Structure formats: C-alpha cells, structure tokens
Image (cartoon, rainbow, N blue to C red):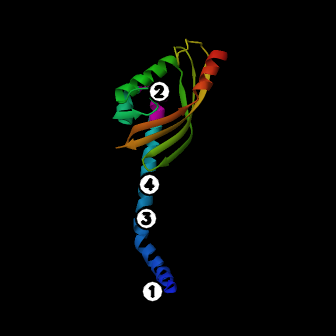
Amino acid sequence: MLNRRTVFAAAAFAAPATFALLRPALADAGACATDQSAANAALLERYVAAANAHDTSSFGDIFTDTYLQRSGRSPPGLAAQIENAQRFFAALPDLHLVIEDRIFGGDRIVARCTYTGTQSGKFLGVEPTGKQIKFGTIDIWRVEGGKLAEHWDQVDFAGILKQLREG
C-alpha cells in the first residue's frame, strides 16, 4: 500500500516529465488561440469598415446566412441583418462606429462600442430631430467558420431617447 509521501514524491518527479511531454501541445494550443484571435480581430475590423462605409454588400462575407440576433430586435438571418443595418443607416446617415475596447477568446468577440450620428430619419419611434447623438453598446459575437454567427448586446436605449427628446 502506498503512503502519502510516496504518492507526493512520485507526483513531484512525474510533473516535470509530464510538462515536458505536454509543452509542444500547449505551445500549439497557444498558437491556435493567437491565430484565431488574429482572425477574429480582422473580422471585427471588416465589420467596422463596412458599418462606417454604410456598405452592406460585404455582409455576406461577414455574417453567416443563419445569423442570430439574440436581442430580439430583428429576425434571424443575413437578409434581416442587412435590412436592420440599412434602417440604421437611413435614420442616422452619418453614423460612425468606434471600437473602444475589444476582447478575443476562442470563438467569441467582445467589444465596447461608441456610435455617433445625426438623426435624420425615424429612429426608435422618434421622428427626425436633426440632433447629433452618441451612445454606447457592449457586444458579444460568436464566430463560426470565420463569420459572425450569433450576437448579444446591451444598448443604452434610455440614453439615446433622452438625447433625442431633450437635446
């Protein structure tokens, strides 16, 4: 029967050998994570460029056909995402998106965003005011096959409405 000292001693001697055997696999995992983070960063940059250009023609390369908007503000699918963006661009024709912070981990992208624009069309049920607005979002996307596949967000709707109604 083994006593505690024997088990601890065996573990102490085995740990360096085990780590030596696993080191290449751990390094590869780190490289894969770095590669995926770089790919996700490039994907986010393509999205920001398309949003700031008000160009939905590249959305097929950015979003999956089955894209899920988990906020419930639009139906699923690429076509619905394009329509949603076009409504946004019509209401705020000078819309500009800035990514303030970004975090990449596995198949997730997290971003803290700031949007600015002048309300020239109906937005959130408010008729055009001509007012410049600024609002923040926290966005989480799931990436699948190199495209945005799913999205959750928190949007400061109260702040937007306050700016539109009160100035």
Q: Vertically, is 86 above or below 110? A: above
Frontmost of labels 2 and 1 is 1
Q: How far apart are marks 3 and 4 (CA)?
A: 11 Å
Asked whether the residues under the numbered discs 4 and 1 touch, taking CB atoms below 8 Å apart as contact, a structural biologist would say: no
Image location (x, y in percent) of residue 76: 37, 30
Q: Can residue 167 be seen in this view?
A: no
The structure residue drawn at horizontal position 47% and vertical position 36%, both measured from the top left corner, is: 152
Q: Vertically, is 138 above or below 4? A: above
SS for dot 4:
helix
The numbered mark, 3 or 4, whose residue comes first in the sequence reads 3
Q: Where does label 2 land, which residue?
A: 53
Q: Residues within 10 Å of mark 1 (few under 14, many from 20)?
A: few
* Image quadrant assignment for residue 84: top left
Q: What residue type is labelled 2?
A: Ala
Q: Where does label 3 land, which residue?
A: 26
Image location (x, y in percent) of residue 10: 46, 83
Q: Nearer the viewer, residue 8 or 140?
A: 8
Q: How far apart are marks 2 and 4 (CA)?
A: 30 Å
Q: What residue type is labelled 1?
A: Leu
SS for dot 2:
helix
Q: Can residue 49 be seen in this view?
A: yes
Frontmost of labels 3 and 2 is 3
Frontmost of labels 3 and 1 is 1
**Where's the C terminus, which quadrant?**
top right
Frontmost of labels 4 and 1 is 1
In the image, which disc is placed on residue 33?
A: 4
* Magenta extent: 47-55
